[in-house]
Amino acid sequence: MNPSRIPSRVKLVEVGPRDGLQNEKQPVPAAVKIELVHRLQAAGLTEIEVTSFVSPKWVPQMADAAIVMAGVQRQSGVRYSVLTPNLQGFEAAVKTQPDEIVVFGAASEAFSQKNINCSIAESIARFQPVVQAALAQGLAVRGAISCAVGCPYEGDIAPERVAMVARLMHGIGVQHVGVADTIGVGTPLKVQRALEAALTVYGINQISGHFHDTYGMALANTLASLQMGVWQFDTSVAGLGGCPYAKGATGNVATEDVVYLLHGMGIETGINLDKLVDAGAFISDFLQRKPNSRAATALLNKRAQP
Ligand code: HMG
Ligand code: MG
């Protein structure tokens, strides 16, 4: 471990309302999504990925994107991001005044086809006018690189594929890339190689980790990323999440678990863990299950003790 590289502060992008709720079978009313966002910002999350402006035929769970964005009472100091796969999505999104948009591509051709119905090259051509329009309007632009470690259709993904997509995204003006282990198959060294590949194109301040926890490796992968100096991560309250086009993949690493890890290492997040646990309990109660977070479970059990 190189302790000098471990950051003293970490920025978490809460993706539960988007990555989490896009994957729920039961309908979640817009009012519940809005309440979740309110509780997350009350817990100190300053970056919230709220929703996606995608085809409602592909992802019906996100069909209420504009309603949710309109219903959120914005808090100063909080940035709200949304996913926009194409100009149609961008035009709908921009009316709702997000602070940041996210284009999402993949390091796997097969996943790109399944998820957004086009090849990697076509996806970059689609993103290009979106990125241009967003930058022209002063919006920040993030790119997600799915299947950066493994793909449900192609298996292992070479780091060179991640570097290639990072280069393509950089070439069209994407300011920041998220290296995503979509199906949670990564282990620390593989994840470090994927991050190193992105770092051949982007600086350390322009990359983040997005780790699903299917095999229980996401916290280990987060620690491995911290050791490289990576200080930005997408996480999901109560471990919600998954992608409808990555069957079998489970949720993102739970925000509660990452906050517990970071605070225990003396790393600042600005997040109040107790309030975060409340936010996770709120959405888990609605979904009629327990939070998928070890730290939240432990803290809820502790609270229940006489
Ligand atoms: P397509 O069918 O190729 O699009 O889908 P199209 O341009 O041919 O249009 C077909 C129909 O979709 C038309 O409607 C369009 O109006 C409509 P029709 O004439 O048939 O009634 N349409 C739209 N409607 C609303 N908003 C839009 C939009 N675009 C077209 N933006 C498309 C292409 C990209 C739209 C589709 O494949 C899609 O929506 N995919 C989204 C899939 C998705 O949301 N996946 C989950 C998010 S990514 C993720 O979770 C991974 C991440 O977490 C990182 C990680 O973990 O890896 C980010
Ligand atoms: Mg994801």
Image (spheres, rainbow, N blue to C red):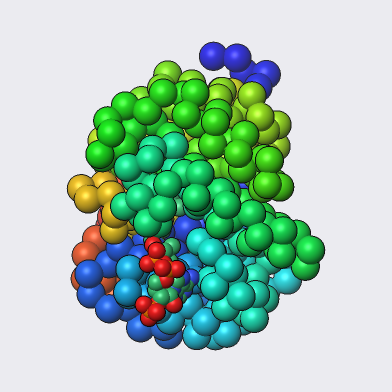
* Above or below 116: residue 283: below
Q: Position of residue 111 (x, y in %)?
A: 34, 45
The one nearer the camera, 288 or 147, is 147
- Residue at x 24%, y 61% (from the top left corner): 290
Ligand 1: give its quadrant: bottom left
Is residue 252 left or right of 98 when viewed as pictured? Answer: left
- Residue at x 35%, y 50% (from the top left corner): 113
Pick the quarter of the image with the N terminus.
top right
Q: Position of residue 245 (x, y in %)?
A: 29, 54
Kindly indicate the quadrant of the structure image that contains residue 23. Answer: bottom left
* Above or below 171: residue 26: below
- Residue, far top: 1
Q: Position of residue 205 (x, y in %)?
A: 70, 37
- Residue at x 48%, y 77% (from the top left corner): 65
Q: Position of residue 168 (x, y in %)?
A: 60, 39
Looking at the rendered structure, the number of numbered marks drawn on it comes to 0
Tell me if residue 257 can be seen: no
- Residue at x 51%, y 57% (from the top left corner): 14
Pick the quarter of the image with the C terminus.
bottom left
Is residue 169 left or right of 138 when viewed as pictured? Answer: left
